[in-house]
Image (cartoon, rainbow, N blue to C red):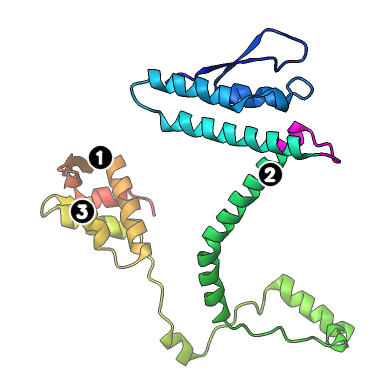
Amino acid sequence: MENPTFRLEGVVKSRDEAQDFEGPLSLILMLLQKNKIEIRDISISEILDQYLAYLDEMQRMDLEIASEFVQMAAYLLYIKTKTLLAVEEEVTELEQLMSSLEKLRAKDFREAVKAVLPTLADYSAEGLLLWTRPQEPVSPAARVYDYRHEGADLLRALYSVFSRSDAKLPGPPEMRALAPQRIVYGVRDKSREILGILGKGPVTLRSLYEAGRSRSEVVATFLSVLELCSMGSVFIEEREGELLLSFAGGDTESILEAIEE
């Protein structure tokens, strides 16, 4: 639906002919240009008659364009009323329009703030249930390092840092018994285990990884598979989305001797 063309006569000081405005937006923008349009010369009834005649030609009324016209007409009526009633204080048309727009903007801002108030209230109620320990005050005396050391003690401490002679002391026997011992898997030993499994038939790479009981064993499995594939002792093929490993054949001991630890 195209915007109607409003024809207003005698509204431009420097021109006597009719002035056309393409839609409500064009008319309201023309009003913003000071010293060109007199509010007293704008006939609201004339604009309304033209707009109603335009709507009669349409098969159905476009509510979006109608709302634009109502908003534009309301501003015109407001500005014209203020101008006709103003006696002592001279207020420009632009100032009147800007004041109205600022009030609408402030109203929208208040509505936006009110919309988030329930959420902020929930956060506030949750925060009131939390309790934190206050920071303990530190006395000025505690900030001063008042220990005294002999020069020989400082040299011994410095020597122990550089020599690392006492950096890692062995624990007592009872502590060593409780601490779990780390198991390191060699590539050759893991390759021997993989070749033994493949000698019975093809297996998936996933099953080899799932059999690993630690990160070290999984890493050793990965390195062993790479080594065996590079030597041509193991074939890998994809079957139904899984990587299937099979033994290519050969002497197992000769293959293992060629693997470097």
- When asked about the image quadrant of residue 85, the answer is top right
**Between residues 14 and 99, which one lies in front from this camera angle?**
14
Please name the amino acid that badge 3 sits on.
Leu
Q: Please tell me which residue is depicted at 42% across the width and 87% down the height of the picture.
A: 178
3D distance between C-alphas at marks 1 and 3: 13 Å
Q: Which residue is mark 1?
A: 232
CA neighbours of label 3 inside 10 A, class few (<14), some (14 to 19), many (20+): many
Mark toward the start of the polypeptide (2 vs 3):
2
Give the left or right position of residue 153, taking residue 213 as reference: right
Q: Which residue is mark 3?
A: 195
Mark toward the start of the polypeptide (1 vs 3):
3
Q: Is residue 86 above or below residue 251?
A: above
Point out residue 229 in the picture as x, y percentages from the top left corner.
28, 43
Q: Which residues are magenta?
A: 87-97
Residue 205 visible? The answer is yes
Q: Which residue is mark 2?
A: 102
Q: Residue furthest bottom?
A: 174
Q: Please tell me which residue is depicted at 59% across the width and 83% down the height of the picture.
A: 131
Give the left or right position of residue 94, taking residue 61 as reference: right
Name the element at disc 2: helix
3D distance between C-alphas at marks 1 and 2: 80 Å
> Where residue 173 is drawn, which disc sits there?
none
Q: Please tell me which residue is depicted at 31% across the width and 40% down the height of the picture.
A: 230
Residue 147 visible? The answer is no
Please name the amino acid that badge 2 sits on.
Glu
